[in-house]
Amino acid sequence: MSEVQRQFGESPIEQVRDDELDGLLASAYADTGSAAAVVGAAENEVDLDRLMQDMPEITDLLDTQDGAPVIRMINALLTQAARDEASDIHIEPYETHSVVRYRVDGTLRDVVSPRKALHGALVSRIKIMAQLDIAEKRLPQDGRIALRVAGRPIDIRVSTVPTGHGERVVMRLLDKQAGRLQLETLGMEAQLLARLDTLIRQPHGIVLVTGPTGSGKTTSLYAALARLDASTSNILTVEDPVEYDLPGISQIQVNAKIDMTFALALRAILRQDP
């Protein structure tokens, strides 16, 4: 409550019944928006030949006029997820159907349920966008998509895993603009914030940031880096992947395919006057 009051100011607090709150939540999450409409229109007109057409490296989805059903379906799902501020998109295959779910505010909710026949086409389109091997369906793969939604740069980390009913896809959405937060806005107590500020300014040592998925580890680390004065320090990072670009900081991307590991990058950094 203190965080809400800090953001929106003092306001009268009214108590509501549990059933009223449950009804409002159900009503809000029942609105699947344009994605459901596109799925419904596309289920009977999938053109797999158009699916194979590659797309530009950076595309603003709101300006895309491509009418291919699967392409329009994926674009609608990504656009709606960005508008809903979803952190993840799950595309899960089952015996008779597929399910698309968004994670919003830490909670997964169903969005649409395409027919099972569409699942392979959806996964293949995503793998093309992420520059993954569409022929490899037996091994997990990881990739990345860079695009724009309404002018906002969005990075998407793509992970595929084979299951008994097909490939399962999870996409993590990273809003580059939303990621530039300050430590003061993360909700830390003043005493904890002061201790962390002292620690990150030490010339040597280590600070461990731990927690489950979605707990804010990445956001906290980027906020801590942004707090440092890059104009008077030589700051380098090793990341897998580089999620947000930080001005004045050299960010190194781990790449296991060419043996660019954390260990190799750290050894190289020692010769860079860090």
Image (cartoon, helix red, strand yellow):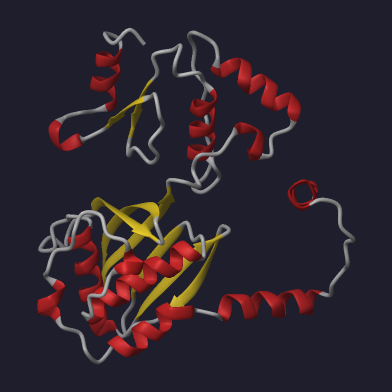
Q: Residue at x 37, y 66 (%)?
A: 78
| Coordinates of residue 146 in the picture (x, y in percent) | 29, 52
Q: Is residue 48 left or right of residue 101?
A: left
Q: Is residue 267 above or below residue 221?
A: above
> Which residue corresponds to the image point at 21% horizontal and 68% vertical from the top-left?
125
Give the residue furthest to the bottom: 44
Residue 198 in which image quadrant? top right
Give the image location of residue 214, x and y in percent.
51, 48
Query: How many numbered dots are placed on residues in this image?
Result: 0
Nearer to us in this view, 55 or 209: 55
- Could you tell me residue 197's position as x and y percent? 62, 20
Left or right, 152 with reference to 167: right
**Residue 165 percent location from the top left of the image:** 27, 74
Which quadrant is home to the C terminus? top left
Residue 70 vertical placement versus 203 (above, below): below
Q: Quadrant of residue 58?
A: bottom left
In this rendering, position of residue 229 left or right of residue 151 = right
Q: Is residue 247 above or below residue 203?
A: below
Q: Residue at x 64, y 80 (%)?
A: 27
